[in-house]
């Protein structure tokens, strides 16, 4: 019983982490139609930057925010200088981001070498709480809380603010939104930067239990992919639901069928593709 | 698609040089490089059926390539003969390709690419994590090469000839495909899927068959790969391999027969040259990707052909369209 509830907490916290990763991916892919294969690289680069700051003795939250800020700059540069020139050419954008992800992976290998780094959990979130005779690590609970808070924040931003309305207008009909005086290209840059920052933030948050190693990008990108295929591109709620499904499957799969856990992750994706190709909460493209 | 006697002569000359390569090439190192180029070209030609003619960009082909290699290698390690392992690998890979196609063809365009990427990662995950069967990261050693008609293929020159014959068969099958009515309908589904559907073509079936055809040559290339290296590990199935194959297709020029072959030659030669000096092949691969996409998106073969035509004075006003076309439902 205690094992199961601990597994459940671990699943939920992994789900929260996946949500932070895939929310940005889903927005960029679903809203801007940019298939950003660098998203795993943002996660890994953020985690490495955070780990370096932590090794120099900086506060955990400062490290997480600084890594996110760095990724806002890098994401913005990539979007403005490279992706923008290829607007509308989806395939070229895929290949460009794929190429950049290889460059980033190799740069990380050069700078941080091949040895994995595992930062300590922040001191104020160490330990655990004891309730109902069970022990829950506080850090995992904190991740769940932060993910839910960010999910609510994004939902309010997209669905309830003027900025969100402008983003949705730009997605539905960019030329018409421009005629109305909305600067669509700036909005898209902003969405891209938010996505990159969320991925980096998730990278730092996840580093105490995932650790940071070469290949982390290639491990995380498929997870973001299946979350988005599951939940439906462009749907935040879909990303949330998909993330928790994958988080649960990953932890319970690992506990019950360690050899095949990785394959089990893809089963819901296969089912969704067969039964509902637009994703659980995706809109049918018109 | 006009036949040009000069060009045909040039291609035949090149093929003659390739066919006689073991006779005049003294260094076995270069014979081996040539073998590598040719089996990667078979892989790239197979991928090009989907990418170039079908407009369906797959990032999961390394999974199929490695699947074929693993099936053959594991059967041989468990005591089966070459004659049993090879058909099993090809048939097994065709079945796996059918599964890939059935799932990925639920959509087109970027979603197709994402799904093939995810499916390729599943196969990689099986190879890497299911260590009881696949031996995980340690990989599988393949004992030897077959000896068809009593010719021992462990000799590099003999192996080269076997790869060359396979390559020619592949090239001929591609030529037949491109010139057939089926090839025309495949290009039709790439450019105008809705019109093709309105004309009564079964667009899904046309794409499915293209996927199987592509999977067949990918499987053959996978077998040549394990015979050449006598070893296979999960690394072969990683995203990098799919990306390399895609780079071969794109750098040479999609939807041409020469393009993937030239691209395979460029990538293999560059990989060998770069690896001799620096360890940073992945970075070079990434930078080449970025440069080609930014400056020569149509690919090197059509790009050079364009320059050649303009030099010969037959300048055409029409700008080359972007070589990268994605099949979609194109509502606009």
Image (cartoon, rainbow, N blue to C red):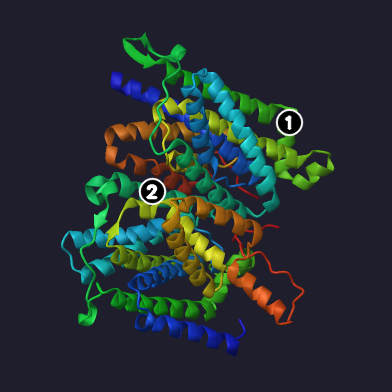
What is the x, y in percent for residue A37?
54, 46
Using the image, tell me which numbered label, if any, was put on residue A229: none
- Marks 1 & 2, CB-CB < 8 Å contact: no
- In the picture provided, is B92 more to the left or to the right than A170? left
SS category of the residue bearing label 2:
helix
What is the x, y in percent for residue B191?
63, 67
Measuring 54% from the left and 28% from the top, which residue is drawn there? A201
Does residue B146 lie above or below A165 as drawn?
below
- In the picture provided, is B175 more to the left or to the right than B64? right
Crowding at dot 1, Cα within 10 Å, few <14 / some 14-19 / many 20+, comes out as some
**Residue wearing tag 2:** B122
* Chain under callout 2: B
Measuring 60% from the left and 69% from the top, which residue is drawn there? B196
**Residue wearing tag 1:** A163
Res. A140 visible in picture: yes
Residue at the farthest bottom position: B5
């Amino acid at each position: 019983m205690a094992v199961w509830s601990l597994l459940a907490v671990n699943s939920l916290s992994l789900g929260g982490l996946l949500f932070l990763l895939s929310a940005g991916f889903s927005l960029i892919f679903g809203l801007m139609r940019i298939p950003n294969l660098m998203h795993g690289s943002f996660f890994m680069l953020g985690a490495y930057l955070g780990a370096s700051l932590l090794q120099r003795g900086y506060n955990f939250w400062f490290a997480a925010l600084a890594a996110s800020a760095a990724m806002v700059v890098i994401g913005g540069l990539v979007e403005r200088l490279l992706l923008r020139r290829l607007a509308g050419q989806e395939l070229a954008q895929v290949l460009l981001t794929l190429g950049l992800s290889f460059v980033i992976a190799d740069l990380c290998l050069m700078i941080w070498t091949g040895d994995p780094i595992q930062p300590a959990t922040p001191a104020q979130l160490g330990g655990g709480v004891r309730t109902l005779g069970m022990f829950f690590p506080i850090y995992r609970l904190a991740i769940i809380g932060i993910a839910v808070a960010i999910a609510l924040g994004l939902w309010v931003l997209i669905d309830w603010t003027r900025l969100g309305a402008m983003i949705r207008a730009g997605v539905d009909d960019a030329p018409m939104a421009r005629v109305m005086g909305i600067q669509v290209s700036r909005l898209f840059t902003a969405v891209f930067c938010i996505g990159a920052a969320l991925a980096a933030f998730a990278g730092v948050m996840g580093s105490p239990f995932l650790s940071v190693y070469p290949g982390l990008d290639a491990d995380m990108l498929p997870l973001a992919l299946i979350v988005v295929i599951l939940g439906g591109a462009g749907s935040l709620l879909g990303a949330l639901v998909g993330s928790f499904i994958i988080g649960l499957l990953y932890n319970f799969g690992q506990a019950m069928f360690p050899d095949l856990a990785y394959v089990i992750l893809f089963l819901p994706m296969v089912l969704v593709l067969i039964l509902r190709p637009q994703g659980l909460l995706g809109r049918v493209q018109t | 698609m006009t036949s040009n006697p000069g060009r045909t002569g040039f291609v035949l000359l090149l093929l003659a040089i390739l066919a006689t390569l073991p006779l005049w090439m003294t260094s076995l190192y270069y014979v081996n490089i040539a073998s590598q180029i040719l089996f990667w070209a078979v892989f790239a030609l197979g991928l090009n059926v989907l990418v170039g003619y079908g407009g369906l960009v797959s990032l999961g082909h390394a999974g199929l390539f490695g699947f074929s290699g693993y099936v053959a290698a594991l059967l041989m390690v468990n005591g089966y003969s070459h004659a049993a392992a090879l058909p099993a690998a090809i048939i097994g890979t065709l079945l796996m390709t059918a599964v890939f196609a059935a799932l990925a063809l639920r959509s087109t365009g970027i979603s197709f690419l994402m799904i093939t990427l995810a499916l390729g990662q599943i196969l990689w995950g099986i190879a890497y994590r299911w260590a009881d069967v696949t031996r995980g990261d340690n990989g599988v050693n393949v004992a030897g090469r077959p000896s068809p008609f009593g010719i021992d293929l462990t000799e590099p020159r003999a192996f080269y000839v076997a790869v060359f014959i396979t390559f020619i068969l592949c090239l001929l099958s591609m030529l037949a495909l491109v010139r057939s009515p089926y090839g025309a309908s495949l290009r039709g589904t790439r450019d105008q899927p809705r019109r093709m559907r309105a004309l009564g073509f079964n667009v899904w079936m046309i794409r499915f068959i293209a996927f199987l055809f592509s999977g067949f040559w990918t499987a053959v290339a996978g077998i040549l790969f394990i015979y050449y290296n006598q070893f296979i590990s999960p690394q072969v199935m990683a995203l990098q391999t799919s990306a390399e194959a895609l780079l071969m297709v794109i750098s040479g020029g999609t939807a041409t027969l020469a393009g993937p072959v030239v691209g395979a030659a460029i990538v293999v030669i560059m990989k060998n040259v770069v690896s001799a000096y620096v360890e940073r092949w992945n970075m070079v691969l990434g930078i080449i990707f970025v440069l080609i996409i930014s400056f020569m998106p149509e690919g090197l073969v059509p790009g050079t052909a364009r320059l050649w035509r303009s030099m010969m004075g037959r300048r055409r006003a029409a700008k080359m369209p972007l070589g990268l076309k994605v099949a979609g439902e194109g509502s606009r």
